[in-house]
Image (spheres, grey):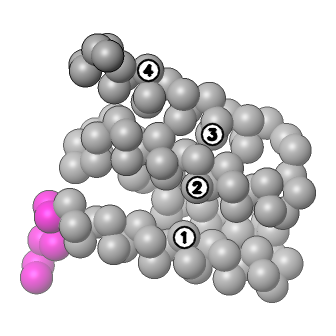
Amino acid sequence: LESYERFSFAAWVEYECMMKAASVFRDQRLYADMEDFIREHIGKYLDDSFDQFGHFTKALICLNSAEVYRKVGAVYEFSHRLSLFSLFHLSQISLIFPL
């Protein structure tokens, strides 16, 4: 497929592969490379112009990325920022679909 990115299921499979690759960096204790990889390859899914994933999926991506940082033992700003982004995306869902 030339433009497989337009299919959300293919984008989700690509995202899962990127998270596995980030976990490999973590397991090899290449933390700087892991952070660069997450920012470059996984951060694109959180961009506002990436409209294939909804707010719920973007919130899951934020939480999964924060979990990778937590497993490393990182207690710094980026991990907390990801958690806040997940709350933001969840709040957007509640604005669209009030309970």
Q: Are marks 2 and 1 in contact (CB under 8 Å)?
A: yes
Which badge, 1 or 3, is on the more N-terminal residue? Answer: 1
Q: Is residue 32 visible?
A: yes
Q: Are marks 4 and 1 in contact (CB under 8 Å)?
A: no
Badge nearest the viewer, 4 or 1: 4
Q: Which residues are magenta?
A: 1-7
Give coordinates of residue 75: x percent, y percent. Answer: 87, 44
- Relative to 74, 94 lies left or right: left
Residue 19's disc is 1
Q: Are marks 1 and 3 in contact (CB under 8 Å)?
A: no
Which residue type carries mark 2? Asn
| Res. 54 image quadrant | top left
Give coordinates of residue 81: x percent, y percent. Answer: 67, 34
Which badge, 2 or 3, is on the more N-terminal residue? Answer: 2
Residue located farthest toward the front when viewing the structure as drawn: 99
72, above or below 44, in the image:
below
Spatial CA span between label 4 and label 1: 24 Å
Spatial CA span between label 1 and label 3: 15 Å
Q: Are marks 2 and 3 in contact (CB under 8 Å)?
A: no
- Relative to 41, 52 lies left or right: left
Q: Secondary structure at mark 1?
A: helix
Residue ID for mark 4:
91
Give coordinates of residue 68: x percent, y percent. Answer: 70, 61
Badge nearest the viewer, 4 or 3: 4
Badge nearest the viewer, 2 or 1: 2
Q: Secondary structure at mark 4?
A: helix
Which badge, 2 or 4, is on the more N-terminal residue? Answer: 2
Residue 64's disc is 2
